[in-house]
C-alpha cells in the first residue's frame, strides 16, 4: 500500500516539475502562435482611425454647407446640406460601435445618434436659447438625428423649412450649434487616438479592461442594441406588443417628409461596418487580423470542433440579403409589410446569438463588466 | 461499538481547533470587508430590482439599506469567532447571517460560499473556544484537550470537498476533450507573461492540467492525511491554488482552501503558530487555569447532528442521478456538489410574451429588469429561466394583461460545442411550476458528458 502511494506521489511530482521546467523546448512546435495585438493593430490603424478621419471630413463638409445654408437659405444650399448630412450619417455608421477611449468618456455615440429625438425639447431649446448640449438631458436634442429634425422636421416640406430659416435666425443658430459641438467632439476623439493608439494596441491581455475585451464587448453591444433593436426591432414593434412604432426609425424626418428615403441605406451601412469589423476589412477592402482570424486560429488549434467563423460570415450574408429586400423607406416597409422587417430582425438575431454564446465563449470574453468572483 | 466508543472518547490537543477558529474567523472577516469595499453589496443586493431566489427560500430577500447592517453583523461575528469571544453566540450568528446573505440572490452562488456556510454550521457543534480565546480568558479556564472527532470532522469535510471535486472531473469533457481548460488556457490566459502565448497554447499542457487537476483533487486529501507526505501535500496545495489565482478570477476560494488545509498538520504545529500570534497577549492570559479535557455539554446530541450532517453531505451531491438527461446541460442537481470550474457555458435567452386576449406578442428587453450579471447567469440555467419567466408573467399581469403566455427563446453553448436550442420554444413557461420536478421543457443535449 505504501509503495503504491509512493509511486503515485513521485509520478505526480515528476510531472509537476516537468510542467514547470520543460516549456522552453516544447514551445516552438505544433500550433502557430497568435498575437492578439495584431487584431488591435489592424482595427486601430486600418479601421477605427481611418473611419474616424472619414467621419471628421464628412462632418467638416456638412459644417461648411450648414454655414453656407444658414447665411443664405436657398434650395441649392439646402440640397447640398442635405446631401452632406446623409453622407456624414453613413460615415457615422462605421464608428458608432467604437465606444472606447475618449469616445466613451464623452459618451459620443449618445450625443450623435440618439433617436427618437425629443421635438419639444428642441423647440424649447431653440426658443429659450438656454441649453447645455454637453448634458445628458440633451442627448435627444442634438447630433445627426437632431440635424435630421432641424432640416427635415421643423416643417413638412423643403420650401416651408427654408422659409422658417429665412423668417427667424434662431433656427440657424441652433443648427450651427449642433454642428459646432459635434465637430469639436469629433476633433477631440481624432486627436486622442493619436496618443491612445499605442496603449490600445499594447493592451492585448484578457482582463475586462483590455482593448480586445472592450472593443469586442462594444461591438456585440452595438450590434444587439444599436443595430438590431434600434434600427429594426423597435420600429417593427418587436418589443411593443405588436404595435409598430414607425416614428422610431433612424433619421425619421427625412423619410417621413419625403426628403429622401435614408433608413435602409443607413442600416445597410451599419451592417456592412459590422461585417467589416468581424472580417478585419478596411475601407480600402484589404483584410487583416480580426475576430474572424482569431476564431480560425482557435479552430485550427483544435480548441473546438466546428469552425464558427464561416457560420457567422454566412449569417452576415443572410442578414444583408434580408435588409436588401426591404423598402428603402422603413416607415413604408413597416406600414405595408412588417413581416419582412421581422424577418430581417431574425437574421440579425442569429448573429447576436452566435456572437454572444459561441464567439465570446471561445474567446473567453466576459459579457458583463462586473468584477465578480467565480469558482 | 467498542471501537466507536473508544474513538469518541479519544482526545487531541485543543490547539488545532483554536488555530482553525482563529484563521477561519480572520479570513471571513477579511472576506466580508473585501466584499463591501468592492461595492458589491450595492451592486448585487441593493441596485437590482429583481432577485433570483432558491426554491423554498423565496422569503429570503435583501433588506434594502439594512443589507449593510447584515454585513456588519456578519463581519463582526466572524471577528468574534476569530478571537473566540462569546463563541457559540458568534458562530451561530455568523452561520445565520452568512447563509442569509448567500440565499438572498442565487445569481451570486459560488461553491466556496456554500463551503463557508456548511463549515460554519459544523463549527457550531465544536468547542473551538477551548483555548487561546477571549472566552477562556474571561472564564479563567482553558482546556488543553478536545475530542479528536472535532478536528477529524473538519478534515472529513475538506476531504469531501476535494475528493468530490476530483470525482466530478471524471467526465468526458474534462478528461477526453480537456475542456473547458482548453478554451480558458488558450484564449483566457493570454495575459500571462512568457507562458501566456507559448505554454498555455500547447494542447499537451491542456491535457496535463486536466488530468493533473483530477489527480490532485482525488489524492490531495490522502497526501495531507499521511504524515510523511503532509508537507509535500501542503506545498502542492499552495502551488495548485496560487496557479488558479493567476489564471482565474476566483476571489477568496484559494486562500480559504490553503488556510483550511493547515488543519491536517499536528496540534504541535498549530500550537507553535498560536504561541507566536498570541505572544503580545501572553502577560494577560497568564492567570488562566489550564484544565485537561473539555466536557462538551450534550456531546451525544452534537455527535448525532454531525453524523447526520455528514450523511447528507456524502449523499447530496449524488442527487443528480435521480434526474434523466445530461447533468451539465440540464443542471438538475448541479449545485452544492463541489463541481468547480467544469463548464464554459454561455447562453442567450429572450422571452416572448403572448397576449391571448388581443392575439399579439412582443419580446422583453432583459436589461429592463436584470443586471448584466443576472442576465448572464439567467441565460444558461434552467431554474433561473423559469423563475424569471414567472416574474415576467406576474409583472405583465399586474400591468393589465389578463391572459398571457411566456415563451423562452434560448441558445446555449457548452464547453466548445456551438450553441444549440436550450428551451422548448413551444412550452408556456407559466404553466410549469418551480420545484425539484424534472424539467421536461429543456431540449436534451443528446450527448453524455458526465459519466460518473
Image: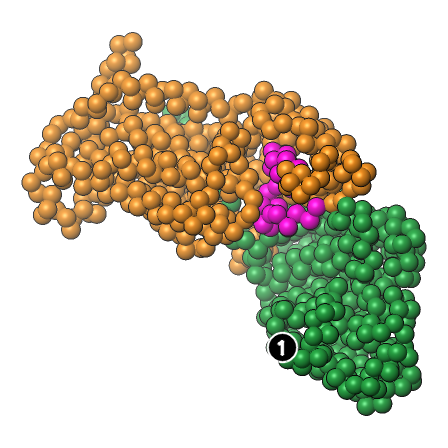
Chain colours: A green, B orange
Residue at image point 24% right, 36% down: B87
Between B204 and A14, the one lying in front of the other is B204
**Left or right side of A173 for B230:** left
Between B116 and A305, the one lying in front of the other is B116
Which secondary structure type mostly characterizes the magenta part of the structure? helix
* Residue holding disc 1: A132
Q: Position of residue A132 (x, y in %)?
A: 62, 77
Asked whether residue B368 is drawn in magenta, I would say: yes
Between B277 and B76, the one lying in front of the other is B76
- Image quarter of residue B131: top left
Vertical position of residue B354 compared to residue A290: above or below: above
Residue at image point 32% right, 37% down: B93
| Residue that sits furthest to the left in the current view | B287
Vertical position of residue A43 compared to residue B126: above or below: below
- Image quarter of residue A325: bottom right
Residue at image point 8% right, 35% down: B289
Between A164 and B448, the one lying in front of the other is A164
Q: Is residue A202 visible?
A: yes
Q: Which residues are magenta?
A: B364-393
Marks counted in the figure total 1
Q: Chain of mark 1?
A: A
Asked whether residue A89 is drawn in magenta, I would say: no
Figure quadrant of the C terminus of chain B: top right
**Left or right side of B286 for B44:** right
Q: Position of residue A194 (x, y in %)?
A: 65, 78
Figure quadrant of the N terminus of chain B: top left
Q: Position of residue A69 (x, y in %)?
A: 84, 86
Amino acid at each position: 500500500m505504501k509503495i503504491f502511494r509512493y509511486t503515485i506521489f513521485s509520478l505526480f511530482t515528476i510531472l509537476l516539475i516537468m510542467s514547470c521546467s520543460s516549456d522552453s523546448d516544447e514551445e516552438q512546435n505544433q500550433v502557430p502562435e497568435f498575437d492578439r495585438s495584431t487584431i488591435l493593430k489592424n482595427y486601430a490603424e486600418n479601421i477605427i482611425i481611418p473611419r474616424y478621419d472619414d467621419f471628421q471630413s464628412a462632418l467638416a463638409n456638412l459644417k461648411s454647407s450648414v454655414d453656407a445654408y444658414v447665411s443664405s437659405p436657398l434650395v441649392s444650399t439646402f440640397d447640398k446640406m442635405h446631401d452632406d448630412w446623409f453622407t456624414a450619417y453613413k460615415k457615422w455608421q462605421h464608428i458608432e460601435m467604437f465606444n472606447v477611449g475618449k469616445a466613451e468618456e464623452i459618451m459620443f455615440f449618445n450625443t450623435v445618434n440618439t433617436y427618437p429625438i425629443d421635438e419639444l425639447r428642441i423647440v424649447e431649446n431653440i426658443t429659450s436659447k438656454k441649453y447645455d448640449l454637453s448634458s445628458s438631458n440633451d442627448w435627444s436634442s442634438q447630433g445627426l438625428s437632431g440635424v435630421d429634425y432641424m432640416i427635415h422636421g421643423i416643417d413638412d416640406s423643403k420650401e416651408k423649412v427654408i422659409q422658417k430659416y429665412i423668417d427667424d435666425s434662431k433656427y440657424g443658430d441652433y443648427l450651427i450649434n449642433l454642428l459646432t459641438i459635434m465637430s469639436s467632439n469629433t476633433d477631440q476623439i481624432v486627436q486622442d487616438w493619436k496618443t491612445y493608439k499605442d496603449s490600445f494596441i499594447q493592451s492585448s491581455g484578457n482582463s475586462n479592461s483590455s482593448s480586445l475585451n472592450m472593443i469586442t464587448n462594444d461591438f456585440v453591444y452595438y450590434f444587439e442594441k444599436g443595430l438590431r433593436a434600434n434600427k429594426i426591432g423597435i420600429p417593427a414593434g418587436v418589443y411593443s406588443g405588436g404595435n409598430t412604432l414607425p416614428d422610431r426609425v433612424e433619421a425619421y424626418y427625412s423619410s417621413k417628409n419625403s426628403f429622401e428615403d435614408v433608413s435602409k441605406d443607413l442600416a445597410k451601412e451599419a451592417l456592412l461596418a459590422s461585417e467589416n469589423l468581424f472580417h478585419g476589412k478596411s475601407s480600402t477592402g484589404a483584410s487583416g487580423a480580426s475576430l474572424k482570424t482569431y476564431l480560425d486560429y482557435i479552430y485550427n488549434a483544435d480548441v473546438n470542433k466546428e469552425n464558427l467563423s464561416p457560420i457567422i460570415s454566412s449569417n452576415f450574408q443572410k442578414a444583408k440579403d434580408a435588409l436588401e429586400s426591404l423598402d428603402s423607406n422603413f416607415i413604408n416597409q413597416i406600414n405595408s409589410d412588417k413581416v419582412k422587417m421581422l424577418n430581417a430582425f431574425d437574421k440579425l438575431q442569429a448573429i447576436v446569438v452566435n456572437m454572444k454564446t459561441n464567439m465570446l465563449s471561445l474567446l473567453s470574453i466576459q459579457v458583463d463588466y462586473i468584477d465578480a468572483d467565480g469558482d | 461499538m467498542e471501537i466507536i466508543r473508544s474513538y469518541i472518547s479519544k482526545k487531541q490537543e485543543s490547539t488545532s481547533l483554536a488555530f482553525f477558529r482563529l484563521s477561519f474567523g480572520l479570513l471571513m472577516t477579511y472576506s466580508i470587508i473585501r466584499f463591501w469595499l468592492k461595492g458589491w453589496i450595492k451592486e448585487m443586493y441593493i441596485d437590482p430590482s429583481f432577485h433570483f431566489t432558491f426554491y423554498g427560500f423565496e422569503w429570503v430577500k435583501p433588506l434594502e439599506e439594512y443589507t449593510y447592517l447584515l454585513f456588519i453583523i456578519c463581519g463582526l461575528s466572524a471577528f468574534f469567532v476569530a478571537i473566540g469571544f462569546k463563541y457559540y453566540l458568534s458562530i451561530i450568528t455568523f452561520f445565520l447571517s452568512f447563509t442569509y446573505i448567500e440565499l438572498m440572490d442565487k445569481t451570486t452562488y459560488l461553491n466556496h460560499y456554500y463551503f463557508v456556510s456548511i463549515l460554519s454550521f459544523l463549527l457550531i457543534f465544536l468547542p473551538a473556544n477551548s483555548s487561546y480565546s477571549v472566552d477562556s480568558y474571561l472564564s479563567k479556564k482553558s482546556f488543553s484537550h478536545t475530542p479528536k472527532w472535532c478536528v477529524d470532522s473538519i478534515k472529513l469535510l475538506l476531504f469531501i470537498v476535494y475528493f468530490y471535486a476530483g470525482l466530478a472531473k471524471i467526465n468526458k469533457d474534462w478528461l477526453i476533450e480537456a475542456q473547458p481548460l482548453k478554451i480558458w488556457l488558450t484564449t483566457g490566459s493570454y495575459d500571462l507573461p512568457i507562458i501566456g502565448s507559448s505554454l498555455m497554447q500547447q494542447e499537451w499542457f491542456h491535457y496535463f492540467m486536466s488530468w493533473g487537476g483530477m489527480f490532485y483533487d482525488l489524492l490531495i486529501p490522502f497526501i495531507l492525511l499521511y504524515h510523511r507526505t503532509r508537507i509535500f501535500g501542503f506545498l502542492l496545495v499552495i502551488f495548485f491554488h496560487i496557479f488558479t489565482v493567476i489564471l482565474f478570477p476566483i476571489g477568496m476560494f484559494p486562500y480559504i482552501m490553503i488556510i483550511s488545509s493547515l488543519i491536517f498538520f499536528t496540534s504541535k504545529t498549530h500550537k507553535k503558530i498560536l504561541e507566536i500570534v498570541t505572544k503580545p497577549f501572553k502577560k494577560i492570559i497568564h492567570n488562566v487555569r489550564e484544565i485537561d479535557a473539555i466536557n462538551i455539554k450534550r456531546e451525544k446530541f452534537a455527535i448525532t447532528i454531525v453524523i447526520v450532517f455528514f450523511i447528507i453531505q456524502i449523499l447530496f451531491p449524488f442527487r443528480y442521478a435521480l434526474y434523466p438527461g445530461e447533468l451539465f446541460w440540464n443542471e438538475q442537481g448541479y449545485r452544492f456538489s463541489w463541481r468547480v470550474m467544469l463548464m464554459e457555458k454561455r447562453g442567450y435567452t429572450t422571452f416572448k410574451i403572448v397576449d391571448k386576449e388581443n392575439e399579439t406578442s412582443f419580446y422583453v428587453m432583459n436589461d429592463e429588469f436584470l443586471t448584466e450579471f443576472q442576465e448572464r447567469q439567467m441565460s444558461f440555467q434552467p431554474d433561473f429561466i423559469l423563475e424569471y419567466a414567472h416574474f415576467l408573467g406576474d409583472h405583465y399581469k399586474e400591468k393589465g394583461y389578463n391572459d398571457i403566455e411566456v415563451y423562452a427563446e434560448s441558445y446555449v453553448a457548452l464547453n466548445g460545442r456551438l450553441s444549440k436550442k436550450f428551451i422548448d420554444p413551444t412550452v408556456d413557461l407559466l404553466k410549469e411550476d418551480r420545484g425539484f420536478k424534472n424539467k421536461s421543457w429543456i431540449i436534451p443535449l443528446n450527448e453524455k458528458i458526465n459519466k460518473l
